[in-house]
Amino acid sequence: MSIKTFLIGRPIESVKEKHERVSKFTGLAVFSSDAMSSVAYATEEILIVLVLGGAGLLHYSMPIAIGITTLIAIVAASYFQTIHEYPSGGGAYIVAKDNLGINAGLAAGSALLIDYVLTVSVSISSGVAAITSAAPFLYKYRVMLCIISLLVITVVNLRGVKESGKIFSLPTYFFIAGIVILICVGLMRITSLQHATHPVQAHVYSDIMMIFLIMKAFSSGCTALTGIEAISNGVRAFKAPESKNAGITLIWMAIILGFSFTGITFLTHRFGILPSDNETILSQLAKTIFSQGFFYYFIQGTTFLILILAANTSFADFPRLSSIMAQDGYLPRQLANRGDKLVFSNGVIILSIFSAILMASFDGDTHSLIPLYAVGVFLSFTLSQAGMVVHWLKFKGKGWVKHIIINALGTITTATVSLVISTTKFIHGAWMVIIAIPIIMYATKKINLHYQSVSKQLSIKNAEPTEEYIHHSVVVPISGIQSAVLNAIKYAKAISGDVTAVYVCLDPVVTANVKKSWESYGMGIPLVILESPYRSIIEPLMSYIDDIRDSYKKGIITVVLPEFVPQKWWHHLLHNQTAIFIKGIILFKEGVVSTSVPLHLK
Amino acid sequence: MSIKTFLIGRPIESVKEKHERVSKFTGLAVFSSDAMSSVAYATEEILIVLVLGGAGLLHYSMPIAIGITTLIAIVAASYFQTIHEYPSGGGAYIVAKDNLGINAGLAAGSALLIDYVLTVSVSISSGVAAITSAAPFLYKYRVMLCIISLLVITVVNLRGVKESGKIFSLPTYFFIAGIVILICVGLMRITSLQHATHPVQAHVYSDIMMIFLIMKAFSSGCTALTGIEAISNGVRAFKAPESKNAGITLIWMAIILGFSFTGITFLTHRFGILPSDNETILSQLAKTIFSQGFFYYFIQGTTFLILILAANTSFADFPRLSSIMAQDGYLPRQLANRGDKLVFSNGVIILSIFSAILMASFDGDTHSLIPLYAVGVFLSFTLSQAGMVVHWLKFKGKGWVKHIIINALGTITTATVSLVISTTKFIHGAWMVIIAIPIIMYATKKINLHYQSVSKQLSIKNAEPTEEYIHHSVVVPISGIQSAVLNAIKYAKAISGDVTAVYVCLDPVVTANVKKSWESYGMGIPLVILESPYRSIIEPLMSYIDDIRDSYKKGIITVVLPEFVPQKWWHHLLHNQTAIFIKGIILFKEGVVSTSVPLHLK
């Protein structure tokens, strides 16, 4: 208990739950860290694919970046509409469930849960890569650094993060400022540099192969869009007029994101920077432009911080989504409860465990995780926007034709991208997500069926008429005469007037001794001796209990078991656990209740 | 239950326990399989060490074999005396405990327990090697074959082996006959063969190094003595006069063992057979003498069978020794009980698990296991014979001087051999056993202390005067109004006249509803509402219970918890396990007993 208090702090009272409202300026910082942070790796992921096709393909990086920036614009426009229609927060699960039905909702929900785990893993891995690029001697400890960062984020979130704008504003704006300065200075340097030419290697590819590689590079780059939906989930956190402010913030975020991503990709191409195992593209670019001075370390440091913040947003989103799904009865109920610190602690812990497993299995390597990443994100985009199309069709309203065109364009584009990503990344890991989504959906439906069936059975409308028991018999199985047994007998006498002690005879000599001692210590309770030719204690006992049950049809039986509570857990291994077996069997016997009377050992 | 019945069979009644008495002829078969089977690998283990020193050392195999045969004679003479002094069975644990005190007894017992595990592992590995020598395509499946053999032996033993002489006699006498014929035919062949000369390799060793290697080879060969003590443990199984018959059988066993071992070593040397990875020495020898005909396969088959029987003897010895030690309170009590089939099932299962782990970790390779093997055996020999020396000193009796000389010679010899084995084999694995023995000893003493302390606390002499409880209060914590709760209330009313339902308020609106429903469904029981500013259910409940406890000093409190029993185990994960927490806390609260009233879900 004291370790928990040290790490997590004292509990917070329920009445202290309140909501902070953010301005556009702070809101941009709070909700954009996830989206903005992806510029730290998206360009690199494009180049890693293109370089497989030889240097001849590298000049496709710019067209791809422009395509992705267009995609950002389309998706942002689409979500701009969601913000105005769902001012109380329009996550993909809610929008899809409301408009397309529960299956679409569960598909979006499952995709998002996976996505949040991946956001944590990818962001932390990538953040650690920013550190190891600047300090290469740490490279071999990268998995450990990932796990330490994860633990810190987990503990901070279990303590209950005040989603204070101040904490988020500084690193986010520092990062944005750093990237903008990097791009501006980079653009000035280019004029004084000659055009970098990559050595053209002799890779000869068929057209189809080339198109496939370019599409694959595009898929990798699409990770730049992850987190773009964050503002639409958090409309309620903005100051009034909420939807208007959130919408303007979304547009600003899209502009900054598009500019940073295109700028970095352009400079990387012009400076002829190639992906390397130990150093990120962004680190190489910053080193090329600023050499290894203060500004280089500033860029690496803020990159690390914004990636950690990005991971942190999933620690708000995952527990919130899983608590909504749990309240709907599609996830275990434990996920719906707030812990000591008003945080959905179980969700935080589960997210942390899954992320740790992912980072450890993929060796803390961002590139290996990327193929799993964008599939779920784009599936939820598609479902959420298809949901909006249906929404407009149902409710129509002012300017619905324009609205429907924008959301339909969003749906078609993101659906196409989903297909491209699933195809090109399938064998590299997307298959895992494509298999996992239906499995999670199946599990959520099974869980829901169970809850429905339980609630029907527990309903008092279905309860049998509450007729009182007319008799209460107590049976105390004893293994000999010792103080735990006498303790149990004493308890049995307190709860009923009809108490019998039962002893199973395994050895006639011992039994005779027990019988004799019982006369002096038995507190006037009758002792029944049961024969057991096969040395089983359970069977004769159970048939004796059945006999009693048959003689009092409307009665209830309590089996009182003497138990001792040892001081150390391993002491349990040293005692016959017959009592546990007896309780396990009685648990399934109607009309019989078992009780252990503990004797505390020193 | 049905799988258990299929594998293990129906239970056997206690009264059917009886003892078969064996003649000298059958007794030799029953008790010698362990010792005799070691001739299948002992020669090979000597050569494997010598060959490291180059072919020049190989001619030391005969002197070593003669030394070991002398050792067999000394140890057999020593045990001959034990047989006459401990006609009811003189295992090393008993002899050492009786004469040298409990520490020596526990050391011998720990050493023997380890030894039995190793007998199983070494015998099965070696038996499988006999099979894979004859059928080399099975070599890569050897670990699997080991595990299958182990499982078969385990199941047979859990079913309850009737130690029927007939089962043992056939393979043992077939094996002995095979080996005797092999040696006789081999000796005849030698005259027609020229003396085999090994190519002398250019290994130059220092004298010390050479002596060390020879001592190491000797240590390996000492595995031939394992199992020689078996007859002294089982004197009671012989027909009257038990000691006389057992003694004569021991002498016969020693003669046959010495003859077989020396004969095989001699022939191996003369035919110039060298150890190989895939084929045993015995297989090569049989192939050289008989070529690959019927007789070759007869030797391999009976070798496999006798090694399996040898493993099987540990399945009688380990559970018996551990049950004796458990009855003395030095091992967990569960090991002392006979199962459905009158077998010490827990001991059988534990032996099987440890052997499986050993065989799997050592890749089913006899040679890697051998360095662990003889240490424990010789330690128990030494302790047992030192015990006999003390025994003679105490009781003297007819001819005690002669007796003491024989046992002292045995003690000194086996102590010396123990030291040699520990030294030469230390780094190859003997260290594991040397570390394990004191650890097991420490554990047995801790276990004993615990049992002593418990038995003192449970003793009715120390029990407080049994004053009856003057009041019985029942508290039923409820989470809402549903049929599991009504069920619990109904039970509570049956066991006491003072029942209170308790509801912890987390949400004032819900609480108001509960209060209202309670009026119609509460069966006249008062409902207490507890406030919980920190959303904890446990804390307000516990302080309420403490209050009741304080108001009835000589009373007892039962906390009745509504519980539902779901159909499938994973359904448990879907419900808040608050009841388990409550029970866990109450377990450590004096004067409070908790009871779950189950409602069975469909």
Image (spheres, coloured by chain):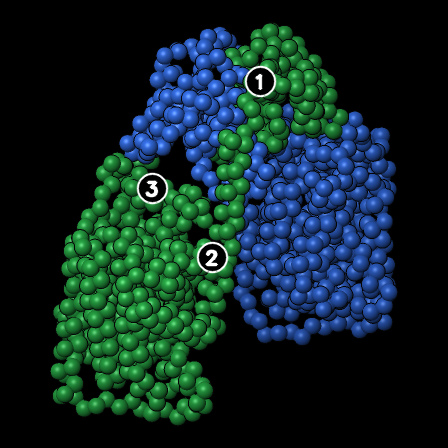
Chain colours: A green, B blue
Query: Residue B379 at x, y = what percent?
Result: 60, 42
- Looking at the rendered structure, the kind of residue marked 2 is Asn
Could you tell me which secondary element the residue under label 3 belongs to?
loop
- Whole-angstrom CA distance, mark 1 to mark 3, is 39 Å
Q: Chain of mark 3?
A: A
The residue positioned 80% from the left and 69% from the top of the image is B288
Q: Quadrant of residue A415?
A: bottom left
The residue closer to the viewer here, B87 or A471, is A471
Mark 3 or mark 2: which comes first in sequence? Answer: 2
Residue at the image point whose x is 55% and y is 51% from the top: B430
**The C terminus of chain B, quarter of image:** top right
- Tell whether A341 sits left or right of A108: left
The numbered mark 2 sits on a residue in which chain?
A
Q: Which residue is mark 2?
A: A103
The CA distance from mark 3 to mark 2 is: 27 Å
Residue B540: percent from the left, percent from the top? 34, 26
Q: Earlier in the sequence, mark 2 or mark 1?
A: 2
Q: Which residue is mark 3?
A: A338
Secondary structure type for disc 1: loop
Q: Assess disc 2: are there few (<14), some (14-19) or many (≥20) residues with their C-alpha within 10 Å of its C-alpha.
A: some
Q: Which mark is residue A259?
A: none
Q: In this picture, is A160 found above or below B304?
A: above
Q: Amino acid under label 1?
A: Tyr
Residue in view at x 29 percent, y 41 percent: A342
At horizontal 39% and vertical 16% (from top left) the residue drawn is B549
Q: Name the image quarter holding residue A256.
A: bottom left
Q: Secondary structure at mark 2?
A: helix
Residue A289, quarter of the rendered image: bottom left
